[in-house]
Image (cartoon, rainbow, N blue to C red):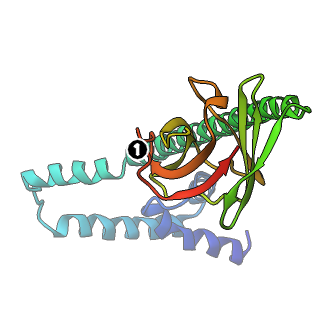
Amino acid sequence: MTQEKHDSFSENIPAYVLGALNRTEAFALRRHLETCPACRAEMARYQQVGDGLLTALPLQVPPVSAKGKLLARLDEKKPRSNFKIVRGFGRFAAAFVMLALVATNLFAYKQVADLRRQQTQLADRIEKNHMLLGMLTADTEIHPVSAEGFTGNLLLDREKNLSYLLTWNLPDPPADRVYQIWLVSPNGERIDAGTFLPEADWPFTSTALVASRDFAEFVGIEVTVELLGGSESPTGEQVLEATY
């Protein structure tokens, strides 16, 4: 055996006494000790020093509280806390997914509701257009509307007892107000003929007049601004009129 190889075994003796060698190194050193008296003697000296250190200090009995503190520290280092973190994150992720699904469903519901509303408005518009086209006959009277800032016409079919008010660029009334149509009788009496609002996204507004009597019994119309729901008689500002 070379001196270098022998020295490597000798250098491993302190680590062997302390139990710091791996299994392969410890096995090789034990095999070497079987044939090397010098290394056996050196290891005996190290073992004697180690035993002396152990017996140099008196045996100390740990306090009763030490066990509790040690168990508490071990409990803190258990991976259970990581599980709580993971479980908490999982709950947060699940809640986030639920909120995202609810928000998506609400958005889809709103989209469907808007589409249905648009379809309803379009159907109403088509129906009104058909009614207006049906009134464009030789028997239909067209009377201009007198107003400031916008224009309009009153369509009247005395034979069918139908009447429509058409207005262009009619401004919106205040938030808590509506436009109300009044039929004017020869003696000045005003009869309610319905309320309306300007149609959004359309250049003109068409409104059918509602009357319990023949339109031929009246001489004209007026439109005033009234509270939501309408009034029994004109109380607000008059915005237009037409005679026939």
Q: Which residue is mark 1?
A: 84
Q: In the image, is residue 95 above or below residue 5?
A: above
Q: Nearer the viewer, residue 210 or 203?
A: 210
Residue 49 appears in the picture as rendered: yes
Question: Residue 194 location in percent, x, y?
Answer: 56, 36
Crowding at label 1, few (<14), some or many (≥20) Cα neighbours within 10 Å?
Answer: few
Tag 1 secondary structure: helix
Question: Residue 65 location in percent, x, y?
Answer: 9, 53
Outermost residue, right side: 138
Q: Which of the 4 image quadrants contains residue 36?
A: bottom right
Quarter of the figure with the N terminus: bottom right
Q: In the image, is residue 42 above or below residue 161?
A: below
Q: Residue at x 71, y 62 (%)?
A: 150
Q: Nearer the viewer, residue 160 or 105?
A: 160
Q: Residue at x 61, y 44 (%)?
A: 221
Q: Residue at x 9, y 55 (%)?
A: 61
Residue 173 appears in the picture as rendered: no
Q: Give the side of residue 132 with respect to residue 13, left or right.
A: right
Q: Nearer the viewer, residue 65 or 92?
A: 92
Q: Give the side of residue 16 with respect to residue 165, left or right.
A: left
Question: Residue 110 location in percent, x, y?
Answer: 63, 39
Q: In the image, is residue 75 above or below residue 15?
A: above
